[in-house]
Amino acid sequence: MRKILLLLFSAVALCACKPTTPEQLAKRFVLDRAVDPSSIRILYHSEVLRQERTKQDTMYHLAALLPDTAIIDSIRIETRHFPEHYYCYWTIEGNDSSAHPCHCNIELAVFPNGEVMYYETYRDTYYGATASITHEQRDTLTGIRTPGFYKDADVWALKQMLLER
C-alpha cells in the first residue's frame, strides 16, 4: 500500500512541476532564453485564445487597369490554415548581456500541446498559403476603387482591396 501511495504522490508531484497554463509555459519560455533570468521583472502579460480557422483570399490578376474599371485574366484562391493557440503578449524588464537594464515586449504563440514559439515564427510558418488554386477567367470589374499601390496592370490584387468602397 505504501508503494502505491508513494508512486501516486510522485506522479502528482511530477505533474505539478510541469508548466500547464499558457502563462506558465510562456514564462518558462521567456526565462529559458533570458540572458539574466534572475533580473527579469514582468510588467504586463496577457493571453488571448485564438480559435483554429481557415481563411481564403481571392486575388485577381489585373490585365488592364482603367480609372474605375479593371480587366482581369486570372483568379487565384489562396487558403491559409491557422491552428488554435494562445496569443501571449509580455512586457518585461531585465538586464542585457552587458548588465544594463532593458525593457522589451515579447509576442508568443502557445499551442495546446505545450509548444511555444515567438509570434514572428508563427507568422512565418502559418501566414503563408497552404494551398493555391489559379484558373483563367476573363472578366471586367466596374465601379472599383484603385488604391495607390495598384497603379499598373500585371499585378495580383486582393478582391477586398478592389471592391470595397
Image (tube, helix red, strand yellow):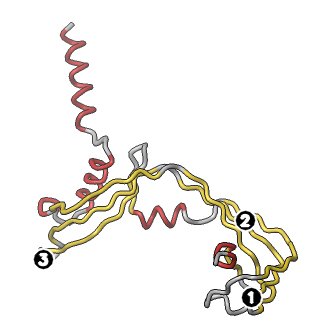
Q: Is 161 placed above or below 108 here? A: below
User: Mark 3 — residue?
Assistant: 100
Counting from the top left corner in percent of width and height, residue 51 is at 49, 49
Q: Toward which corner of the image does residue 90 lie, by quadrant? A: bottom left
Crowdedness of circle 1 by 10 Å Cα count: few (<14), some, many (20+)?
few
Q: Toward which corner of the image does residue 145 lie, by quadrant? A: bottom right
Residue under the point 80% across and 89% down: 64
Q: Which of marks 2 and 1 is in front?
A: 1
Secondary-structure class at tag 3: loop
Counting from the top left corner in percent of width and height, residue 123 is at 49, 65
User: Mark 2 — residue?
Assistant: 77
- CA distance for labels 3 and 2: 49 Å
Quarter in which the C terminus is drawn: bottom right
- CA distance for labels 2 and 1: 23 Å
Secondary-structure class at tag 1: loop
Q: Is 113 placed above or below 77 here? A: above
Residue under the point 22% across and 61% down: 44
Residue under the point 22% across and 25% down: 10
User: Mark 1 — residue?
Assistant: 68
Counting from the top left corner in percent of width and height, residue 161 is at 64, 77
Q: Is 108 placed above or below 150 here? A: above
Counting from the top left corner in percent of width and height, residue 88 is at 34, 57
- Disc sitting over residue 6 in the figure: none
